[in-house]
Amino acid sequence: ECFCFRKYTVSNMQQKKNVINLVCYSVKNNVFALCRIRNIGIMAHIDAGKTTTTERMLYYSGYIRTLGDVDDGDTVTDFMVQERERGITIQSAAVTFDWKDYRINLIDTPGHVDFTVEVERCLRVLDGAVAVFDASAGVEAQTLTVWRQADKHQIPRICFLNKMDKSRASFTYAVESIKQKLKTKPLLLQLPIGEAKTFRGLVDVVTKEQIIWKPTSDLDDGKNFEQKLLLEADDPNLFQEVQDARNTLIEQVADLDDEFAELVLGEYSENLDLIPADKLQSAIRRVTLAQKAVPVLCGSALKNKGVQPLLDAVTMYLPAPNERSYEFLQWYKDDLCALAFKVLHDKCRGPLVFIRVYSGSLKPQSAVYNINKSCTERMSRLLLPFADQQIEIPSLMPGNIALTVGLKQSATGDTIVLSKASAVAAARRARRDAGGEKRSSSNIESLLLAGVEIPDPVFFCTIEPPSMAKQQDLDNALSCLQREDPSLKVKLDPDTGQTVLCGMGELHIEIIHDRIKREYGIETYLGPLQIAYRETIVNAAQATDVLDKTVGDKRHFVTAELEVRPRSGERATTKPAIEYAVGVIEELPKEVQGAVENGITNSCIQGPLLGFPVQDIDVTVQSLTLHPNTSHTMLSACVSRCMQKALKKAGIQILEPLMNLEITVSEDHLSAALADLAQRRGNVQEIQSRQDNRVVVATVPLAEMMGYSTVLRSLTSGSATFTLELASYQALNSQEQSALLQRRMGLV
């Protein structure tokens, strides 16, 4: 009764088995000590094997009884129809399972650049992460992106070199790639036994044990393997390689950990072989948690090799929730503090909100306070997530992740606490810890929140229902999808009255279009895909505006004088930097300042030339005069009109999105790819070698990349791949800007 099943390619019997396993699991002890919990994410470039690795983890933990396959569309964590059809992860999926004596809350994240925000919001609630690499490719473009995101959140990581069975797989190349491109220190905890077709096992460098997978006659599921101490007589060359690797590992760890260095220089200085494995493992753990280095393991998830040791490494080297330092916890003491990091919509139960509890506990039917929305909500049920299936649980303790039912207002990035009184008490403690500084409550609240940075969309198109009778249904569907996906923006074109869909890429908008049809039953029509340009100003300019209007018996009078200037230094932000001339701000109440700044900010949403957002400007309020009865709405309107005048006088320059492009192509097709790139205003920065392929690193305007995947497939007979990521915005030259203006006005 607790489940909302959906019809997927997995058989009903498979689903029933999963449910039975889940029920048995939840009947077991549901409370784990904090030190036995691991909140981890799986992150990587697209097609590195994240979902397959996750599926194997579930299988070996006993959580599922049959192995799912991405190509067959029957994996647990790829539960959306689009994911199963395309073989890619679109939405992050949370799964909770046990490994030995540990509880693991695992999130499988997307690898495609269009869904980077899915990774960002999940990293907010993770304590550790597993970075999966294709051993034949090493560090790829999206790997760099998610690695930078993990750096920002200071998340300890371990690396898993996957696909060791693949043609051209190279352990040495992949490790060197991690060292050079990620600027980190890899600690080799395993060495492969064989590579590509000869890969059959690995050696644990710490314990010097070899693990050889030996399939039984009727089944090769990776459960049958032999683990024994590697002796010199077994393989002299491999034995010496492992010996050298262990000595190198000891030296690396000793350089990074003072406690271990004392052991190496003292008790075990005469013979490093005598250093116990547990001492070395403890030191590796300390180094990993301090983010001074990253452990490196290897295997092949598809061939069922190396995943059990990876699970052991997750429990051994990644942190428990109580080993992560969160400043805000000291302010909440033992009261509830939780973060809403994801929202799903269920047709039967409404919004399902994923939350991570940092302190205190949650129980069904309890009231909670949302600091961001300044509202109290009642949570009806708590559910343990298993991809698209859930089971009800009686409580949620610190360090755990679960789904809540009943939170109608909460959205991604909201902080959930016990009550308003609890939030006020936390703010008081924060103020005291800050040295008694007098701050507004809003400033204190912002100190306590952990939001999600949402990148600006780069594509947009109009979307229309089949008839006006369906417009309200479409609006409701888009509202739900926006709440689920913060990177999706929906707005109304004031000139045409059409609904405009803004997204992170062609695939992103395509997926949204498909979901509206499948999940909400609405056939919609998309207009041509267009580029989200920006506008900025060329010169400084001043403008004055006067508003004098009588409404009823009230006179509204405002005189505003503003100066706008191109911003120097920090770039690429649509939020204007606002300052006040000497003597102006002292005379303005806070509410009036808010109205002035709203007017300035709103005028930058749509630029005066083509209606694109205005970025990189500084604004000075030179003077402001207003009648005492003037409403804030009238004040904002006058300031906004004054801003539009100033922007027009300053001269408008159109900016276009410039993308980082990385093409992986064979030597045979390199020249064709480069010739095509030259026609697209591409600027090649370097050409790298990657095994037998070449990697072209370039920048190219997004406008030139429409339909590029089809062209590249044609040029390279389908052998090349590419990734795109927003780099910056660059100014169009006068000829390009003139051509764009003519196209937008329908003259060409």
Image (cartoon, helix red, strand yellow):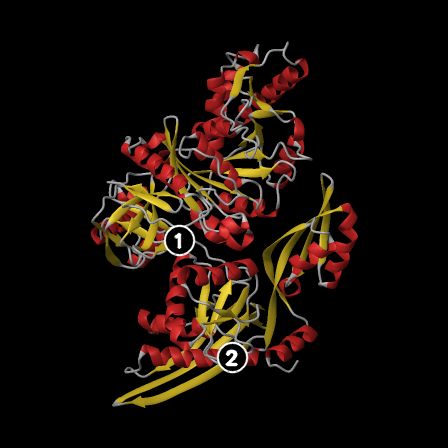
Answer with mark 2 or mark 1, whichever residue precedes in sequence: 1
Q: Is residue 524 visible?
A: yes
Could you tell whether 530 is left or right of 152 in the image? right
Question: What's the residue at 65%, 40% (across, down)?
Answer: 137
Q: Residues within 10 Å of mark 1 (few under 14, many from 20)?
A: some
Nearest the viewer among 374 and 297 is 297
Could you tell whether 298 is left or right of 319 in the image? right
Position above or below: 551 against 330: below
Q: In which quarter of the image is residue 684?
A: bottom right
Instruction: Give the amino acid at mark 1.
Output: Gly
x%, y% of residue 640?
43, 78
Question: What's the residue at 64%, 9% (across, down)?
Answer: 233
Position above or below: 135 against 572: above
Nearest the viewer among 544 and 38 is 38
Could you tell whether 283 is left or right of 250 in the image? left
Q: Can residue 290 be seen in this view?
A: no
x%, y% of residue 262?
50, 18
Instruction: Give the amino acid at mark 2.
Output: Ala
Could you tell me which quadrant the C terminus lies in? Answer: bottom right
Position above or below: 684 against 477: above
- Residue on which the image places disc 1: 451
Q: Do the residues labelled 2 and 1 touch (CB within 8 Å)?
A: no
Position above or below: 313 against 47: above
Nearest the viewer among 433 and 204 is 204
- Residue on which the image places disc 2: 646
Nearest the viewer among 653 and 106 is 106
Alpha-carbon span between mark 2 and mark 1? 34 Å
Q: Quick one: SS at disc 1?
A: loop
- Number of the front mark, 2 or 1: 1
